[in-house]
Image (cartoon, helix red, strand yellow):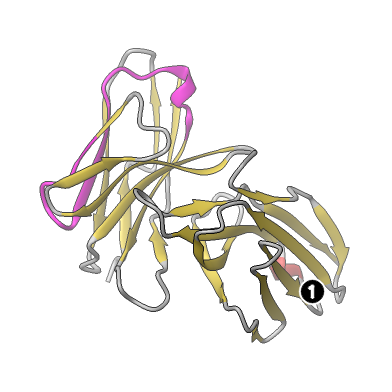
Amino acid sequence: NAGVTQTPKFRVLKTGQSMTLLCAQDMNHEYMYWYRQDPGMGLRLIHYSVGEGTTAKGEVPDGYNVSRLKKQNFLLGLESAAPSQTSVYFCATEAPGLAEETQYFGPGTRLLVL
Amino acid sequence: RKEVEQDPGPFNVPEGATVAFNCTYSNSASQSFFWYRQDCRKEPKLLMSVYSSGNEDGRFTAQLNRASQYISLLIRDSKLSDSATYLCVVNRNTGGFKTIFGAGTRLFVKA
């Protein structure tokens, strides 16, 4: 089992370019999350999904869009990248109702916007 | 004020030392609590849950004080491999997304 995978691992963009980050999971978890992590800020939630076909805004959603067309995939889109979006992006999954309520993270995508 | 606050450190300790981290949370509706560990340039991973009665896992002990709204993590007999960032995580039961991560406390264990 691969767990949670993220594609790509690293990307450099120019201001104004667009891109899509892919998160894939094989754990059959209902919930999926996209976070960004910046120095001194901790993990901040961008968008999340509680099931196939549903998405919701998190703490810092501006400049990002998401889609969850299939249960196993959660896509994060940047329509027009800005230097402020330089960050490390983590995807996470969770199976609600389990005692541990643990989130399982992907390895991250490092994005540099010039 | 951040909803979950941690001392960013870094904590620099020698091998074998005991080190303690504290974390405070502001939302009294918070229901469950966790410590995650994050190695440099890696993803966060669950270290342990924090229960009201306190819990221990080998050299690690977690405590919760609901009245004062803080969580602690104690590491005894520190190892070089304990060097990492420790994230305090709080799940709250109010609308919308529920999981809030602290910014983390960095620990360096030196030989």
Q: Nearer the viewer, residue A84 or A52?
A: A52
Instruction: Please name the residue shown 47% across and 18% down the image.
Output: A83
Q: Secondary structure at mark 1?
A: loop
In the image, residue A27 lies at what x, y percent?
A: 25, 69
Label 1, residues with CA under 10 Å away: few <14, some 14-19, many ≥20: many
Question: Amino acid type of disc 1?
Answer: Ser
Vertical position of residue B20 compared to residue A113: above or below: below
Nearest the camera: B51 or B18? B51
Residue at x 30%, y 68% (from the top left corner): A96
Measured as percent of width and height from the top left, residue B78 is found at: 79, 74
Query: How many labels sit on residues?
Result: 1
Q: B98 above or below B45? A: above
Residue B15 on image: x %, y %: 85, 72
Q: Is residue B101 left or right of residue B83?
A: left
Residue located at (78% from left, 58% from top):
B108
Q: B86 or B41, which lies in front? A: B86
Residue A12 found in image quarter: top left
**Residue interval drawn in magenta:** A66-87
Q: Residue A73 colored magenta?
A: yes
Position of A18 with respect to A40 (left or right) is left
Return the chain for callout 1.
B
Residue B93: quadrant of the picture:
bottom left
x%, y% of residue B56?
Answer: 65, 85
Residue shown at 47% from the left, 27% from the top? A86
Q: Quadrant of the N terminus of chain B?
A: top right
Q: Residue furthest top?
A: A16
Q: Which residue is mark 1?
A: B78
- Left or right: residue A66 versus residue A44 is left
Q: Which of the 4 image quadrants contains residue B20?
A: bottom right
**Quarter of the C terminus of chain B within the rendering:** bottom right
Query: In the depicted view, which residue is nearer to us: B101 or A80?
Result: B101
